[in-house]
Amino acid sequence: MNGLDGFSTPELNGTFNNWCGNCNPMTDVNSDGIWEKTVSLAAGTYEYKFSFDNWAGQENLSAATGCTVTAGTFSNRALVVTSDMILEVICWGLCEPCIEPDTSNWNLNWSDEFDGTELNTLHWVFETGNSGWGNNELQYYTSSSNNLSVINGILSITAREVAFQGSNYTSARIVSNNLVELQYGKIEARIKVPSGQGIWPAFWMLGANYETVGWPQCGEIDVMEHVNNELITNATVHWDNLVNHAYKGSSAPFDPTIFHVYGVNWDDEQLIFTIDNHPYYRYRYADYTNAESIFQKPFFFLLNVAVGGNWPGNPDLTTQFPATMEVDYVRAYSNNSAGLDLLQKPLSCKIYPQPFQESFNLSVPEEFLLNSYRIYSMQGKLIASGTIDSPSKLIQTAHWASGLYLLQVCSKNKIMDSVRICKE
């Protein structure tokens, strides 16, 4: 079994040992990241799966695959023994052959590195209130610096046990809706999550048509969710299957006390979820009703820490406040073989020359006039901005460093056009 380096020692459990938790710990014999276990079995048919730390975490296997046997709420791996045998290397949580590590040449298209001293409002807006957010959550989301801060390159979202506007807890929730909306690519965020009964941090995505079609018709991609004190991270896909709300997902073991990179590789056929570049769950649209029509469209980002709710339950006397999620960065990459995100859509504005040296001309159609332009480094820093006051505007770049930049044309904080530009 591969893909668990850095995590707790995995265990092999099954019908052959009465599902005895830590009775069969595995070992990484050659320090190659492949954990092994030899067991003596009589000929016959067995069920098994991998777990860790005496069932603190276990594989979440899909029932819709050929390697599982499903009884009640559990899907387990199936094994038929007829003689001595060595099983192929398999990866945690995957019923199919292991997904190969991603070696694509990804290009960074957009990022927020959380530099500076405040939230970049060109990327994010606050969502506030105590509506329960569909999950009977207990917090009141605020825009206060007590609940969200940007310091030393880290975005901190903090849940506090503070009475406010009828709620006993406060926290923060930010979204990139109408500001940063992407379609396809590699999405990553480096995050350290809080733990505690009733604490629910998340990094996720909603369909950009959310405001017009609602949920779950817009679709939801949960790149990372962590609840309570569990030693697993969760990835889930939600959608409307033309009958009702449907969801599928999986989980992977992790150490919640340190930073991890949570990601999803997204193209026009599937979503592959990763932690620290280890793939652990694949969701293929073709396997599910109406999925293609939902996940082949733009999505936006959300970051939040919820308190309580249907999934984690309420905090108790063991819960320690404040509970802070730390985010080092959020990044979006593109790859021609994986599809294009919206930052590479056919453009209405023109840049010439391209690449440029001391300056370039921004040529725009009439409907872009009197709107604003903003230019960012690929690390998310604002380099230049202004108003488009003529159909052809000269922009001086003599003081810029060589490299790639992102130019956005905006109307009332809505992105009308985006293009990558290059200085020689």
Image (spheres, grey):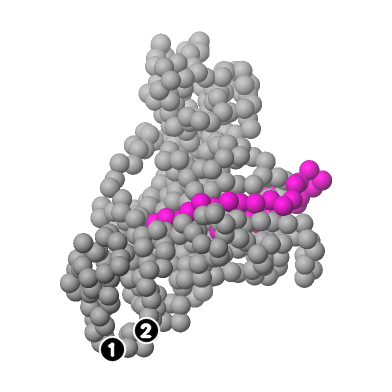
Q: Which mark is residue 243?
A: none
Q: Which mark is residue 387?
A: 2
Q: Write down the quadrant of residue 375 in the picture.
A: bottom left
Q: Write down the quadrant of residue 414 in the picture.
A: bottom left
Please state the horizontal and vertical placement of residue 224, each as a whole percent of the image.
53, 49
Please tell me how crowded label 1 is: few (under 14), some (14-19), or many (20+) other residues with Cα within 10 Å.
some
Quadrant for the C terminus in the image: bottom left
Q: Residue at x 54, y 65 (%)?
A: 119
Secondary structure category for the residue under label 2: strand
Q: Residue at x 77, y 67 (%)?
A: 164
Question: Is residue 368 shown left or right of residue 253?
Answer: left
Check the image and report above or below for 22 versus 414: above
Q: Residue at x 49, y 48 (%)?
A: 190
Check the image and report above or below for 282 versus 422: above
Secondary structure category for the residue under label 1: loop
Please state the horizontal and vertical placement of residue 83, each as a whole percent of the image.
40, 11
Number of numbered labels in the structure image:
2
Decide which of 107, 310 is in the foreground and name it: 107
Please state the horizontal and vertical placement of residue 141, each as a whole percent of the image.
67, 65
Residue type pointed to by label 2: Thr
Mark 2–mark 1 Cα distance, whole angstroms, equals 9 Å
Residue type pointed to by label 1: Ser
Please tell me how crowded label 2 is: few (under 14), some (14-19), or many (20+) other residues with Cα within 10 Å.
some
The answer to whether residue 189 of the structure is visible from this angle is yes
Decide which of 177, 357 is in the foreground and name it: 357
Provide the residue designation for mark 1: 390
Question: Is residue 71 shown left or right of residue 189?
Answer: right
Region rendered in magenta: 303-332
Quadrant for the N terminus in the image: top left
The answer to whether residue 64 of the structure is visible from this angle is no
